[in-house]
Amino acid sequence: MNSVNKADVIVVGAGPAGISAAIEVARGAKKVLLIERAQYAGSKNMYGGAVYTSALKEIFKDDFNSIPYERVINSHTWAFLTDTGSFEMTYKNDDSTSSYAIKRFNLEKWMIEKAKEAGVYYIPNTLVTNLLLKDGAVIGVKTENEEYFASVTILADGVNSLLSRQINLRNNYEPKDIILSVKEAIKLDKKTIEERFNLKDDCKNGVNKQYFGTGFGNLKNVKNLFMMSFLYTFKDTVMVGVGANLADLTKNKLNLNQILDEVKKHPDISPLIKDGETIEYSAHLIPEGGYNKMPKLYSSGVIIAGDAAGFINSVHFEGTNFALISGKLAGETVLAAFENNDFSDRSLSLYRKKLEKSFILKDLYSYRNVIDKLYSRSNSLSVYYPKKIRELFEIITSANCISKAQQMRAYISSFFKDRNIVELFKDAFAFIKCGLDVFFGK
Ligand SMILES: Cc1cc2nc3c(=O)[nH]c(=O)nc-3n(C[C@H](O)[C@H](O)[C@H](O)COP(=O)(O)OP(=O)(O)OC[C@H]3O[C@@H](n4cnc5c(N)ncnc54)[C@H](O)[C@@H]3O)c2cc1C
């Protein structure tokens, strides 16, 4: 056997989870191979646009200051879209540096350099096709041309994680547990972006907008579709995208590219991207099964991290931080296994304990029912309440020779006329249940 093909640890996938895991192992003076199918790490990865900085600081310490971000995202807007406008809520804090807009290609490129400096052997352009097994334990991986052997293999191969399915670690997700998302990168010059979004010209300001609601354009008559759209400002590009779950898209026979076109035409969004040139179009899946669909996270000789394990909190657009920290915890677990020279299922169960102590399993547990509840009330959230909010603000912002008291009474009684009271109770129950789960979480 070629000595190059033998390592202490193999990590599959050079996304945030894999790179972070490999760095942790290399820092513990173990030989680690990081195998990535893409020619350039990050080129096959896609996300909305902002990385939460706390996880990066925890892993990269002082090096964090050289990260190639494009803007600090410190203005966050949540908007309900109606047919003619929107209801928006914005939180802006110029001092906040908790999230950065970074292109994935640049993020992964920078992290790979740091990994190499830490001693990681990086093998790009190489697809892992199979796991190698002996007596039920994973002993390495097979690529198209080679076999590589190690005491532990960390699977950080992203949302589809075909490899963890090979050893039945991952339950197959149902269509309702997967979000399909498409995104366009729209080029505009830096000055135009700063004028349109009221930003300072030093990239210390940036905007993230999250949009809810389907009651506009061609989507107006679509029922049972819960979708979220988003917009992020980069230095000289604006990212606009939309995501919806596969079950809703299939049931409604909807094409997400057409939905994105509708979103881009919305009167609140189109002026922000006017005259921009689409320079990139990408699509990706997001695992949304959460805590209830979490796979067994380890087995003899193998650990799963990041999206492969379904570590995402899509309510808050958090994924890269879950990936980075789960990778780090996977690395720590492996180092502890080396100290005991024990790579068994029992030894690697330390990984789950570490995750339970971290925000990762605490948050996943607290949010375990939220997504299902939101989907179950999709008509309310996407159509009914945006419409009622618009009607309320029409009353507040216009004078039409009818007393406000009369208008408010009519408005409140319309809730019960427009909608079956049972549905209103179901909405209330769902929202209260989600709130209580999160409030009384771990
Ligand atoms: C539309 C969208 C918006 C998002 N927005 C945000 C956001 O704003 N903020 C945020 O924090 N998160 C966001 N996320 C989530 C975030 O992108 C992911 O959670 C994160 O990338 C997961 O990292 P990972 O390392 O687990 O997986 P990935 O980043 O998917 O990396 C997996 C890597 O494994 C490689 N690979 C796969 N199979 C193999 C194989 N067999 N052999 C070799 N290599 C392989 C892939 O090429 C890839 O490089 C978003 C996701 C999407 C889709």
Image (spheres, grey):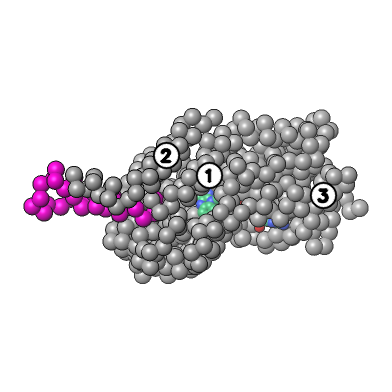
Q: Nearer the viewer, mark 1 or mark 3?
A: 1
**First-in-chain label (2 vs 1):** 1
> Observer-nearest residue: 17 or 96?
17
> Observer-nearest residue: 392 or 156?
392
Provide the residue designation for mark 3: 140
Percent x, y of residue 326: 63, 40
Label 3, ligand 1: CB separation under 8 Å: no
Residue farthest to the right?
1
Label 2 Cα neighbours within 10 Å, binned few <14 / some 14-19 / many ≥20: few
Element type at marker 1? Answer: loop
Most frequent secondary structure within the magenta stretch: helix
Provide the residue designation for mark 2: 429
Residues at discs 3 and 2 in contact (Cβ within 8 Å): no
Is 254 magenta? The answer is: no
Q: Is residue 435 left or right of residue 113?
A: left
Percent x, y of residue 421: 34, 45
User: Looking at the image, can residue 146 be seen?
Assistant: yes
Q: Please tell me which residue is depicted at 88% across the width and 44% down the height of the picture.
A: 135
What is the span of residues highlighted in magenta in the rendered image? 381-408
Element type at marker 2? Answer: helix
Give the CA distance from mark 2 to mark 1.
Answer: 22 Å
> Observer-nearest residue: 330 or 360?
360
Provide the residue designation for mark 1: 313
